[in-house]
Amino acid sequence: MTAENTTAAATIEDAKIEQSVKVYLDWDEVNKRWEIDPVTVDGHQLDGLDGADTDLFKDFWTPEIKAEIETANAEPLPNAEQLILLLLEALPAESTVKSALSEVLDAAGSWADELTTYIAPASEQFHDEESATSQRDSASTIRAAIELLRQ
């Protein structure tokens, strides 16, 4: 194997398929800042730029890479809600936003535990089944939100 072939092989192994999406911004003249254009968060998949691609020169594309690019192009792009979750997941552990969200989720989890462990049973002791059911439902809703945001 020549040095040239070794470089090509290393490049093929390091290649990854990428896609860029458009997040439309509007200029807020009153607050002098960018804001998300509502068309970005309309529930539909985000607009891509040119389709999935790889940073690898086309001369080095293998049939497997071509097939993987075709598969990626066939998959729908995320919508804005899905993109937010992807961004949260991608943030490094030392991110202040990720850290703050983790603290809020931990506190919400503690509150859900309090609702089911202490508050709902106390309501039941006072024969207030309606409140106990509502408190357990609230705890369940909180846990579902936590699960969504911790994916």
Image: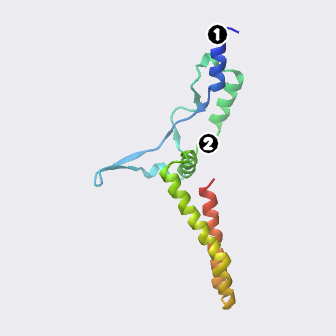
**Could you say which is closer to the camera, residue 132 or residue 113?**
113
Q: Residue furthest top?
A: 2
Q: Position of residue 33 (x, y in %)?
A: 33, 49
Identify the disc placed on residue 95: none
Drawn side of residue 5 relative to residue 26, left or right: right
Residue at 65 percent of width and 20 percent of height: 10
What is the three-letter code of the residue carrying label 2? Pro
Identify the disc placed on residue 3: 1
Q: Are marks 2 and 1 in contact (CB under 8 Å)?
A: no
| Vertical position of residue 91 compared to residue 113: above or below | above
Q: Tag 1: Cα neighbours inside 10 Å, few (<14), some, or many (≥20)?
A: few
Q: Which quadrant of the structure image shows residue 5? A: top right
**Could you say which is closer to the camera, residue 45 or residue 122?**
122
Task: Identify residue for label 2.
Answer: 76
Q: Mark 2 or mark 1, which has the lower sequence index?
A: 1
Q: Tag 2: Cα neighbours inside 10 Å, few (<14), some, or many (≥20)?
A: few
| Vertical position of residue 78 compared to residue 150: above or below | above
Task: Determine the secondary structure under disc 2.
Answer: loop
Drawn side of residue 7 relative to residue 25, left or right: right
